[in-house]
Amino acid sequence: MAHRRLVVVGWVVAAVGILAVSSSVGKRTANNFTLPGTGSQRAVDLLKSRFPAQAGDTDQVVFHARTGTLTDAANRAVIGATLVRIARLPHVTAVVSPYAHQQLTISRNRTIGFATVSFDQRANELSKASVNRVVSVAESARSAALQVELGGQAIEQAQQASLGFATVVGIAAAIVILLISFGSFSAMGLPIATALLGLGTGVGVISLVSHLVDMPDFASELALMIGLGVGVDYALFIVTRFRENYLRNGGDVPAAVEAAMNTSGRAVLFAGATVVIALLGMFALGVSLLNGAAVAASLGVVLVLCASLTLLPALLTSIGHRVGRVRGAEDGAGGKGANARTPADARTGFWVRWTARVQRRPALVAIAATALMLTLAAPALGLRLASSDAGNDPTSQTTRRAFDLLAEGFGPGFNGPLQLAVALPRAHDRAGLTTQLASAVRATPGVASVAPPRVNATGTAAALTAYPTTAPQSAQTSSLVTHLRDRVIPPIERSGGVQVYVGGPTAAQADFSHVLSTKLPLFIAVVIGVAALLLLVVFRSLVIPVQASLMNLLSIVASLGVIQAVFERGWLGGLFGVQPGPIDAFIPVLAFAIIFGLSMDYEVFLVSRVHEEWQARGDATAAVREGLARTGRVITAAAAVMVAVFGAFAISGNRVLSMFGLVMASAVFLDALVVRMLLLPAVLQLMGRTTWQLPRWLERRLPRLAIDAEPEPQAARGSAREPALEPALDASS
């Protein structure tokens, strides 16, 4: 590159400048969680317009008397003073003491009770600082005689675990794996430096864009996680191809860089585009919270992709001689000329033998690999989407201890109350509300108790709190919400002229799961359809798009089967420190978007190399053999980096993070080893020349979008490659 110094300096200046500007203006987060058309959203909208004091989040401060009872004078004094201080905090609209309704809020043995804290905003809109002030004041009342814990949606969100540890582990693992793979500090450092500089710029851009697009507070961390993985992968693919070209052409750095960008660079560009398509496909779900996350993650991928295509070749041009050297390669072949062995030639003996075994019995390998993936996918048939409750939190967290105390004193349903929002037909028509609605809800099976109704100042709206008998994540609680909406409430609405909506965090999570479940097929169809169309245009093949779609889906469903077995059925749950429960509804959505994109990375890199060999040789068997032999090591190295990154999440101790980490790590592991190393080469071997056939009428109508460089003449390629590969193949036969 003629302007390599300008490119490097430009990237450094851009990264520093963007980060400086973003730090000065700050980042704006907006956890907008709206579900238009659902009962929980209608409840929120009604309370916001008519009863703002009840429209925000409602959390609990739980008290446990270790000695004596909560009704003792000393405990009453401490609890009362603490609640007065909490009531004065910003964003707190009301605090209901446990002594206000002792029959509901103090246990029968009078040792456990809870106060209700009402905020002026929903949990996803409250700042962590505001919630942490409530936590700090409440915990100041702790003593040897009085245990104080806090629970609820706002408290839960304020104590969410950071992804920083997993990021550090991912970088450390990437360094070790790349050092082992390349055997060179220079070669190892380039992918890491490229990914980090691209990520740093991306984080700054995301902060700036957050002032234009609503982004949740976890958006930057999600972008960091995905960007780190794909950034290292893309740079790894390009550096590997550069080293191969460098040793083949006798040490000509500019020519090696140009050839690497003309082959692997094109594949990386296409792979990055498919990742962005998969992430932006989340817009099809119509959930505002996920839209901002999709934009942030896409920006992270785009920036590391740009760094891989511009910064990396500039760095390679500058220090390519140090990166390209492979110990022992020059000694064996003089370091130059057509017979110089490449890094791949020096280490592909295993992959040549592996491919030969797959190609000898492709049908058996395809059947065995498919059977393994279907076996792992089988548990996914029992997947139940819901939200994990605080009963799955680590016992070190106050939310878990509050959950356990409420369950012990009142029953598990008190951890997930339902909030009924009522629009009254006439001002202060409270009598009809109390006698009809409250009585009907109280008599419903699955309802433990109902708190007295609260009516707004104008008498046009009321709020009613009902406590289920079962935990928030229980299937019975979801069924109760449906039963209230479909059977219990409609007759009262018709007879009394009222409008009643079932809301609250538990109902909102049930609606969220339902919305995602119903829209997930559309999301999958959009992403797969667009990706398949791109593959059709690029590879001019009907087989490749179908194969890629089915195999990517197989990887995703198998990974969902793994987490269903561990987190829902409880198999090996002790290893991850989790209890059986439902799968959080957003996990399959994020998993599909990210896994599909990563699977396409490996698909494109492997198939593009096979396609390149096919165009040069016209021999389908040799194309599969050469393609896998040349990419097997780099794909497994890239997958190892991703598995290490996501594996750190799997052992984090947080249920949601562990679930996400395990589904991602298992998907990457299965896709890289079972699908790309076994199933894909076996299927391509079985299909033979049919893989690359396309009807002429379709060929004429498709636009041209090539990611392969112009094929070299067979004679030139054969002299550089065959001596290194064929003897190994013969030895394995």
Image: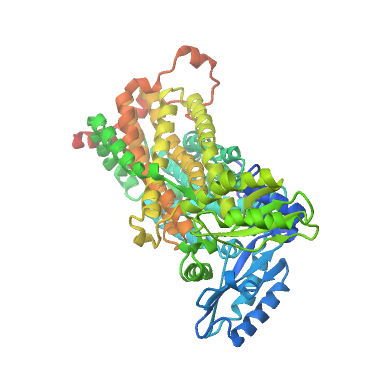
- From the viewer's perspective, tell me whether residue 347 is left or right of residue 507: left
Looking at the image, is 680 positioned above or below residue 12? above
Q: Nearer the viewer, residue 487 or 623?
A: 487
Residue in the picture at 49% in, 15% down: 698
List the single residue furthest toward the bottom.
74
Compared with 601, 48 (above or below) is below
Whether residue 329 is visible to the viewer of this picture, yes or no, is yes
In the rendered image, the residue lying farthest to the top is 697
From the top left corner, tell me how far across and down residue 288 is, in percent: 64, 46
Side of 290 relative to 330 (left or right): right
- 497 or 381: nearer the eye? 497
State the image quarter where residue 701 is shown: top right
Where the N terminus falls, by quadrant?
top right
Residue 572 image point, x, y percent:
33, 57
Q: Answer with left or right where residue 715 lies relative to residue 429.
A: left
Seen at 26% across and 30% down, the residue is: 362
Can you give x and y, in whole percent of width and height, for residue 588 in the image? 48, 45
Residue 247 point in image, percent of width and height = 39, 41
What is the count of numbered marks? Answer: 0
Residue at horizontal 50 percent and vertical 77 percent from the top: 109
